Amino acid sequence: MGGAERRERERRQAATEARLQAARKATGKASRGGILGNTPALAIVAVVVVAAIIVGVVIAANRNSAGNAPVAAHYPVSRADTVIVAGQPSAPKTISVYEDYLCPYCERLEQRYGDQLTTALNAGQIKVEYHALGFLDASSSPAGYSTRAANAALCAADANIWPAYHAALYATQPAEGGPGLSDEELIQKGTDLGAPNTFGQCVTGNGNAAAIASATNTAVANPALQSNGRFGTPTVIVNGSKVDLNDTNWLTEAIAG
């Protein structure tokens, strides 16, 4: 990793850590209610619109360097199988986010739009369905980190710590090609956020793995989630229509519309 790339990654992590601290303070306020075929994972991810998200990294870095406080989460969270539903069930707008905790562009999406999403969720303007996938399982060594992280996120929803845990996974996102965070590290993040002992058992048991694999297969095969016949992460759907992430006003327009 070159010096410039290292500094950029450190800047992104510092910004996400700031948001994590705000989310950690809010923990407890919210109520609880690979499988890629023959296409290489990295080639598929490259299909994702990168330009808008790179711009977002710069904006997010500027926002945090300016001293603006991150937005704390205080919206309800529930779980429907492998989908985390954030926000009021009666919210007028629905946004679906298909993400992978190993995907660097998902981390950048979180950086660019995380505060805006949290603000709208807190205000009851939207609800967000987060689909955590094992899309990049083959991009860790040994394979499988994406599924392990997705399983841990589902365990975090059961433990009533999901907003802060979601932020924590992106704050310390491992690089592709490595082993990812260990089960012990995933558990420690939950423990630090006040998760009960059952959280550790949920993480090590990896009991959601089969459901995550099925959800990943379904997402990859869904034409409505594809661009040029390929699926990539992040993919965002607003009220049933796929968002062009090259349009940096997509979230503002979704909330207003």
Image: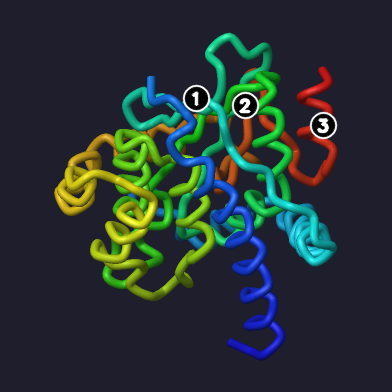
**Distance Cα–Cα, label 1 vs label 2:** 15 Å
At mark 3, the secondary structure is helix
Label 1 close to label 3 by CB (< 8 Å): no
Q: Nearer the viewer, residue 197 or 170?
A: 197
- Residue bearing mark 2: 95
Tell me where residue 124 sits by quadrant.
Answer: top right
Residue drawn at x 56%, y 17% as measured from the top left: 88
Residue 214 rendering spot, x and y as whole percentages: 30, 35
Residue type of the residue flagged with mark 3: Thr
Is 64 positioned to the left or the right of 137 in the image? right
* Residue found 84% across the figure and 63% down from its top: 66
Amino acid type indicated by mark 2 = Ile
Local SS, label 2: strand
| Residue in the image at 73% along x and 55% along y | 53
Residue at mark 1: 76
Q: Which of pointers 1 and 2 indicates the residue nearer the eye?
A: 1
Which residue is most to the bottom? Answer: 3
Residue that appears at 84% across and 38% down: 249
Q: Residues within 10 Å of mark 2 (few under 14, many from 20)?
A: many
Which of disc 3 and disc 2 is earlier in sequence? Answer: 2
Residue 24 visible in the shown view: yes
Measured as percent of width and height from the top left, residue 42 is found at 51, 63
Which of disc 2 and disc 1 is earlier in sequence? 1
What whole-number distance in Å separates the C-alpha atoms at marks 2 and 3?
A: 12 Å
Amino acid carrying mark 1 in the image: Pro
The percent coordinates of residue 84 (x first, y second) are 43, 31
| Secondary-structure class at tag 1 | loop
Q: CA distance from mark 1 to mark 3?
A: 22 Å
Task: Looking at the picture, tell me which residue is in the foreground, 97 or 182.
Answer: 182
The residue beneath circle 3 is: 252
Point out the tag, 1 or 3, that comes first from the N-terminus.
1
